[in-house]
Image (cartoon, rainbow, N blue to C red):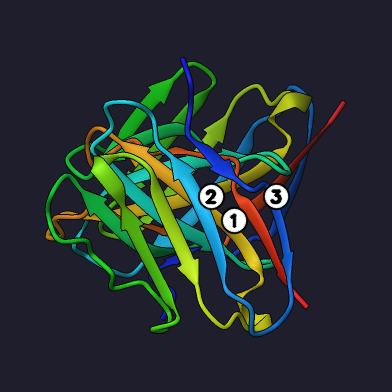
Amino acid sequence: GAGVSQSPSNKVTEKGKDVELRCDPISGHTALYWYRQSLGQGLEFLIYFQGNSAPDKSGLPSDRFSAERTGGSVSTLTIQRTQQEDSAVYLCASSKNREEQYFGPGTRLTVL
Amino acid sequence: DQQVKQNSPSLSVQEGRISILNCDYTNSMFDYFLWYKKYPAEGPTFLISISSIKDKNEDGRFTVFLNKSAKHLSLHIVPSQPGDSAVYFCAASDGSSNTGKLIFGQGTTLQVKP
């Protein structure tokens, strides 16, 4: 079956520009997570969506970061006024339960 | 603060031998632990997990051991195969949290030599 998909796979942008990253979770998965992996680091939790509940935004590093999940399915992570330190691989994951999360291939963001 | 630590950035083993990857954690509220494997340019894939009520879970060549008193877990791969070469991440989940968000270690790069 189809796994988690993310687009674009690569994004190069200039400092100060806004970017949008998209995630299509596995059908039927109610939970959706965003993580990011900076160079040489582990995955860092950003935000969590579960059904119609209020999202857990505790991992967002600044107010330049925001995310939406429309219709309980597709999610968009938006980074405004990008900075060089935002360069990382942004990973989306979905799950049916709180245990096994299935990850997409990620979006590699490079801010010049 | 790094709540989940993988102190060995890399490990190299010979094909057929055992690979042992280690992970330490500090948060006593963690009650579920997972190992993920990641190939370059791909997302992490789930490998094996263990609940804090167990001390061992086995799945084929992969076994995870949990020592709660030491706040330590390890992943054993026996026998190791060249296809196991990847980055392995240890992750933990806080049972008191409703989100199920995972806290990841920094990863260990395993190289299995033919």
Circles 2, 1 touching at the beta carbon (< 8 Å) = yes
Q: Which residue is mark 3?
A: B109
State which chain disc 3 sits on: B
- What residue type is disc 3 on? Thr
Spatial distance from mark 2 to mark 1, Cα to Cα? Answer: 4 Å
Q: CA distance from mark 1 to mark 3?
A: 7 Å
Same subunit, labels 2 and 3: the answer reads yes
In the rendered image, the quadrant that contains the C terminus of chain A is bottom right
Spatial CA span between label 2 and label 3: 9 Å
Residue B82, image quadrant: top right
Q: Where is residue B29? Give x, y as percent.
A: 18, 62
Q: Which residue is mark 2?
A: B89
Please tell me whether mark 1 sits on a helix, a strand or a loop: loop
Residue at the spot 15% in from the left edge and 61% down from the top edge: A54
Instruction: Identify the residue position indicated by label 1 in the image.
Output: B107
Q: Position of residue A51 (x, y in %)?
A: 17, 44
Residue nearest the viewer, comparing B34 with A101: A101
Residue B7, horizontal then vertical, whole percent: 58, 65
User: Who comes first in sequence, dot 2 or dot 3?
Assistant: 2
Look at the picture and state if A42 lies above or below B38. Answer: below
Which of A105 and B5 lies nearest the eye of the viewer? A105
Disc number placed over residue A109 in the picture, else none: none
Percent position of residue A33, x then y:
36, 51
State whether residue A56 appears in this view. yes
